Image (cartoon, rainbow, N blue to C red):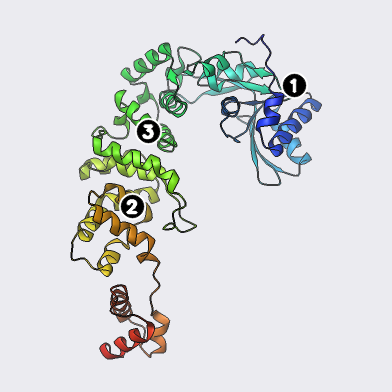
Amino acid sequence: MTQNKKINFESLILNKLPPKIYKLLKSIGIESKKLGYSAYVVGGFVRDLILGRPNLDIDIIIEGDGIDFAMKFAEINKGKAKSHKRFGTSVVTMKDGFKIDIVTARTEIYEHPGALPTVKFGSIKDDLYRRDFTINAMAINLDNGDLVDFLDGMSDLKNEKIKIIHDRSFLDDPTRIFRAIRFEQRFSFNIDKQTEKLLKEAIEKDFLNTITRQRIRNEILLILDEENSTEPLRRMEKLNLIRYIHPEISLTKEKLSILNKIDGLKMFENLPFLRSSEKFDYVLLRLMALVDGLNETDFTDAIDGLFLNKRYIDNLRASFFDLPIALQQINDDAVTLSGIYNSLKNLPLQALIFGIFKAMDEEAVYKLMMYLADLRKIKPFINGDDLKELGYPESPLYTDILSKVFDMQLDGIIENKEQAIKFIKQNYDK
């Protein structure tokens, strides 16, 4: 397709989008025209609209002054605009909390390979030419609904191709190596032959070494946040990119089995063993699978090299160091319910879920599931307030008493509060 062939998306926008979003986009088109600007919705939103995939992440490009438009549009709609003048970007938050990114059309100049770009304001054509792949370089004019497609993105979308816009693309921004893999696998497309040739050259020439580890980390985490991450990771391994997580990681049969199980977790998100506030953290679970089996030094190097936050580090350390010990303990045929509880109670939720996939023994899996579904939800018959009422002074003894009584409760030796009180009185002096 060429830009001379007009394709109008007015009816597609009307029929495929929620009425609220359709009205919002129409309003942006109308108000921008009043101000003498041209407004376009661009990028992944347009791509996914054509593919019929849900995506309400709205990016608006303004030919003109994007910040001026954002401020006035927010005022008209009783919303708020937060702007960054240097980059010509704004985020408009509507009164219902819905957010829209509004950006002045711009071009980007890369001073040297891997550098963050210098931004200059330009036209919609300039803006589309600065993007990563042709399928992400389409726009819809919000005044008339026409598709703007200078780079035949529609053709590549129909032919299921991931294609860069120019031959220096991976040199300018090596993170596009990871993005090419992510989009290829997400949509079950193929990377264009010339694009793949240049991608492999970029890997061989270590273009990724021209950018910071944090930027690489961000792209790896995005891959791990895909609905299905196993295939992108397999592709990464074939291209010798897993080394950017850690050189000693290999996708063994066992590791791939765990990753495939994590990919299938979506269907279990409403299982009763999860509390309403609890969710699967797919990125964290996949990181646990990837670093599992490393030696201690390589594990530490891997998590240090990814610059992860404290919650992730704490969870990964729990799954790496504490989970194997707990699994060994609950594998004992003689283990009691209180033994299962005490072995697992200090492990974070994600480590416990990972344990279900890591455990090779069906009995261990059953015990993990039992803990998640039942044991951790049991309320003790006795608490500290009860001990006060019984006349016991506050002391470290409280912990011993409560732990002992709760163990007996779990094991069925104490069946109610009255029995618990009787046991305490008989066995502990005030």
Residue 171 is left or right of residue 338, and the answer is right
First along the sequence among labels 3 and 1: 1
Tell me the residue at 32%/76% (across/down).
409
- Check disc 1 and give the amino acid type: Asn
Label 2 SS: helix
x and y percent of residue 265 in the render?
40, 44
- Check disc 2 and give the amino acid type: Ala
Q: Distance between the residues labelled 3 and 2?
A: 26 Å
Say which quadrant the C terminus sits in.
Answer: bottom left
Residue 13 is left or right of residue 206, and the answer is right
Label 1 SS: loop
- Check disc 3 and give the amino acid type: Arg
Mark 1 — residue?
144
First along the sequence among labels 3 and 2: 3
Answer whether residue 83 is visible to the viewer in this image.
no
Answer whether residue 16 is visible to the viewer in this image.
yes
Q: Which of marks 3 and 1 is in front?
A: 1
Label 3 SS: helix
Tell me the residue at 43%/38% (across/down).
225
First along the sequence among labels 1 and 2: 1
Neighbours of disc 1 within 10 Å: few (<14), some (14-19), many (20+): few
Q: Are marks 1 and 2 in contact (CB under 8 Å)?
A: no
- Residue ranking furthest to the right: 34
Q: Distance between the residues labelled 1 and 2?
A: 52 Å
Q: Nearer the viewer, residue 321 or 22?
A: 22
Mark 2 — residue?
351
Q: Which of 259 and 197 is in front in this view?
A: 259
x and y percent of residue 372 in the render?
36, 59
Q: In which quarter of the image is residue 346?
A: bottom left
Mark 3 — residue?
213
